[in-house]
Image (spheres, rainbow, N blue to C red):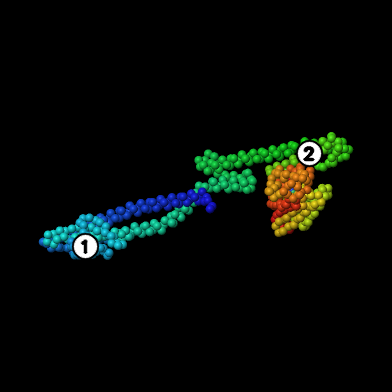
Amino acid sequence: MKKLSIKSRVALWYAFSFLLIILLVGALLLAAGDSLIIKERKSILSSVTDRALEDVRIIQGKLFIDKDIDYYSDGVYVVLCQDNGTLLSGLEPAGFPESAVFEADHTRKIKNGDSSFYVYDRLIENQKIGKIWVRGITSARLRDIAPSAIRMLTGFLIALPILFLIAMAGGWLLTRQAFYPLTRIIDTAEQIRRDGKLDQRIGLGDPEDSDEIKRTAAIFDEMMNQIEKDFEMEKQFTNDASHELRTPISVILAESEYALQYLCGKPVRGSDPQKGSDPLEESLLEIHSQAVQMSSLVSQLLAIARADRHIDQLKREFTDVSLLVEEAIDRFSKEAQRRDIRLEIDAEECCYMDCDPVFMRQVFDNLIDNSLKYGKTGGKTALTVYQDQTWIHVNVEDDGIGMAAEEIPRIWERFYRIQPVSTPDSSKESSMPAQPLVNEDQARSMGLGLPMVKWIVEAHGGSVSVDSEPGLGTSFHLVFPSKHPDSTV
Ligand code: ADP
């Protein structure tokens, strides 16, 4: 069963304690009231009986009863009886037992079935006429002697559930108010976790506040300030370091190319110059190749640092995505030929959206480059562009080495690379289906391309997903919000 929140538990405790206190106070009042009412009733009984006694006289052996005698007053019935119980005058209440014996000057309770009575007897003795009893009788039932108390009790019992509900609601409102800062802390922490934005703050009170929760909130805010500052500094450092590294790397590249040209007698360009036989030439080629990789790494690091710091704001233009994809295919056609991979395109015309073409080119270049790097010789890469009412869809599909399902969630992490399978033997041992050999590009993979792709796609309001089967291929699916040429927004 789901546990109740602290707010609900406190509200319930509050309501139950409130109810308990009301019940206790009610029971005490009832008990005290009950004994007071009984005491009062008994005193009325004796005074009415004594008053009646004053109206009864025996003169010269004869019984005289005053005309003013009250046989019923204040709920008390008065009867005059002989010692054998014979009723001389007066009125007995219904249900009073005839056999009730006489006891002088003593109030007592007599029960008869459902009825109960208080009785008070006074005795008049005379030698001639013997014993005459003046008896006062009154009901001992609370509903007869104090009907208003019963009405109050009934009202109290009816009001009890209503009071309980009011106490619950009041308790809930009070705890909600008291827990508001805690709710703000949870919401803010959740927002930071969900959006990854470190600039969110709770914004309640100050660290000197006497309220513990508000103090916690203020300390949380201060901690976030510090984390954000450190994070900014780290990004600034990456930005600066990448920037500073660019010049020496360019010099190493240029110098190694110059030296190689000098040695081989022909210009060396690009990332994959032909291997030579001379050891000096080989080590220069290695320096050149490492410098190419370093240059690419530094460019990507710089791009990511700038993206994180929002230095490169998107410069949106009304752009045909199909055209961008076609241009990307043209850029990679030679590379595809070199790797013997077919590049196919099926693009709907005029798929317009507001985007930054420079960043978008980077997306398509990255995905096509990966499809060639991780594709298989003699295979193909197919690009599809189409649109519906609201979205533009771009698929980049290859029939290359593919990825294991457990690796897929991690490919969007920076510097994450799937461990390449390096020999034909190990690929046989692997649980995956047989895969093509890993080429030099795969071994040099840096794991920065896809995080950049994701960032750019999401910055344009789109999303990217991937389907992959080891040994069968990979398909990236991009979705962007479209904009029709005739739309004015
Ligand atoms: P890199 O640019 O260094 O390749 P990415 O971030 O682009 O880094 O890719 C991360 C990892 O995802 C790569 O190391 C590779 O293993 C895997 N990957 C990316 N694209 C494909 C693909 N089309 N086919 C198979 N694996 C891929």
- Residue drawn at point x = 77 percent, y = 57 percent: 348
Q: Quadrant of residue 154?
A: bottom left
Real-space CA distance between mark 2 and mark 1, rounded to the nearest whole angstrom: 127 Å
Picture coordinates of residue 178 (x, y %)?
50, 47
Q: Label 2 crowding class (10 Å Cα cut-off): few <14, some 14-19, many 20+?
A: some
Q: Which residue is mark 1?
A: 79
Please name whichever residue, 414 or 364, is drawn nearer the observer in this view of the structure: 414
Q: Quadrant of residue 387?
A: bottom right
- Indicate the amino acid at tag 2: Gln
Please name whichever residue, 137 or 101, is drawn nearer the observer in this view of the structure: 101
Q: Secondary structure at mark 1?
A: strand
Q: Is mark 1 within 8 Å of ligand 1?
A: no
Q: Which mark is residue 290?
A: 2
Whether residue 312 is visible here, answered yes or no, is: no
- Residue drawn at point x = 63 percent, y = 44 percent: 198
Q: Residue furthest left?
A: 60
Q: Is residue 196 left or right of residue 36?
A: right
Picture coordinates of residue 38 (x, y %)?
29, 55
Q: Secondary structure at mark 2?
A: helix
Q: Is residue 4 left or right of residue 137?
A: right
Q: Is residue 484 left or right of residue 125?
A: right
In primary-sequence order, the first of circles 2 and 1 is 1
